[in-house]
Amino acid sequence: MKQASTPFQFVTASYLIRIGRERAVTLAELARGLHSCSDASIFHHTFQSLERQHYISFSNDFAQWALTGCNEAPLAERLAAIDIRDCTTIEGLRDSLTSSVDGYVKLNPSSSSRLSFEPFYFCEAFEFAVPRDERATTLAELEEGIRTSNLQTLHYHFINSRLRLHLQTNDFSHWIETAMELPELARRVDRIDIYMNTLDDLREELVRTIHPWVNQ
């Protein structure tokens, strides 16, 4: 069985959530808040919200509030269309968010000052990452580690890793390609859709994709 050049270290993460001072009750205020809020707030309402919001209409908080708080479905769809898989920095993600809201407000001035049904509170997420006991030096060990990992570990390695690596990939694919030298499997893992799958579904998809390669 093929051994990796370097082991894969499984990590779990927890998040301290803090409600900030900024809030929005109109789209104009949301637009201003997106320009001025912290990077931790952008992270919380986009990357981190994917851990919480697979069962509602949209997977980022800004899009969800545009729909339920402001009844602005076109803007909600525009914000939801921003794919965090294409974003390797918070700055780039912020630019995509602000251009969407600024453009919508400019085209729909009557909507910009209309009071929302409920306020939007800008929150911040602060990450605390801790190495787990599990490490993998083979695909079989990686598969088993994925089977037994908690959802926070899967979220950390498959979603949040894009910001950490500054690459349009995830920790599992990065390790499979660089340490196991299996670029085709790495691509297949990376193609697993984070928007169409819950984290439990993601685990099943990862195992289903990796398992046929274990004995190669």
Image (cartoon, rainbow, N blue to C red):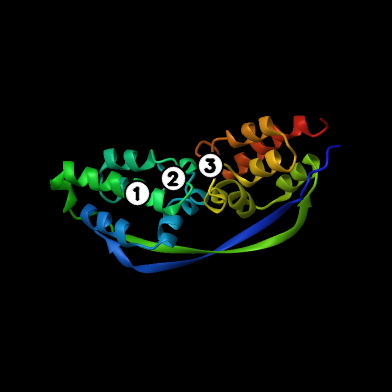
Question: Which of the two discs, 3 and 1, labels the residue nearer the N terminus?
Answer: 1
Which dot, 2 or 1, sits closer to the camera?
1
Q: Earlier in the sequence, mark 2 or mark 1?
A: 2
Q: Residues within 10 Å of mark 1 (few under 14, many from 20)?
A: few
Q: Residue at x 45, y 56 (%)?
A: 43
Q: Amino acid at mark 1?
A: Asp
Residue 171 spot, x, y in % from top left: 63, 47
Which amino acid type corresponds to the residue marked 3 in the rendered image? Answer: Gln
Q: Element type at marker 3?
A: loop
Q: Nearer the viewer, residue 153 or 136?
A: 136
Q: Residue at x 76, y 29 (%)?
A: 212
Q: State the CA–CA distance, disc 3 to disc 1.
A: 17 Å
Q: Secondary structure at mark 1?
A: helix
The residue pinned by badge 2 equals 59
Residue 191 pos. (x, y %):
57, 33
Circle 1 sits on which residue?
A: 95
Image quarter in which the C terminus is found: top right
Snapshot quadrant of residue 72:
top left
Labels 2, 3: front one: 3
Q: Amino acid at mark 2?
A: Ser
- Position of 216 with respect to 188 (left or right) is right
Q: Nearer the viewer, residue 124 or 89?
A: 89
Q: Hey, which residue is sitting farthest left in the picture?
A: 110
Whole-percent x, y for residue 67 in the image: 31, 45
Residue occupying image coordinates x 54% and y 51%: 160
Q: Is residue 61 visible?
A: no
Question: How far, Cα to Cα, is label 2 from label 3?
Answer: 19 Å
Q: Using the rendered image of the protein, determine whether residue 167 is visible from the camera's viewpoint.
A: yes
Residue position marked by numbered label 3 in the rendering? 168
Query: Residue at left 53%, top 41%?
Result: 168
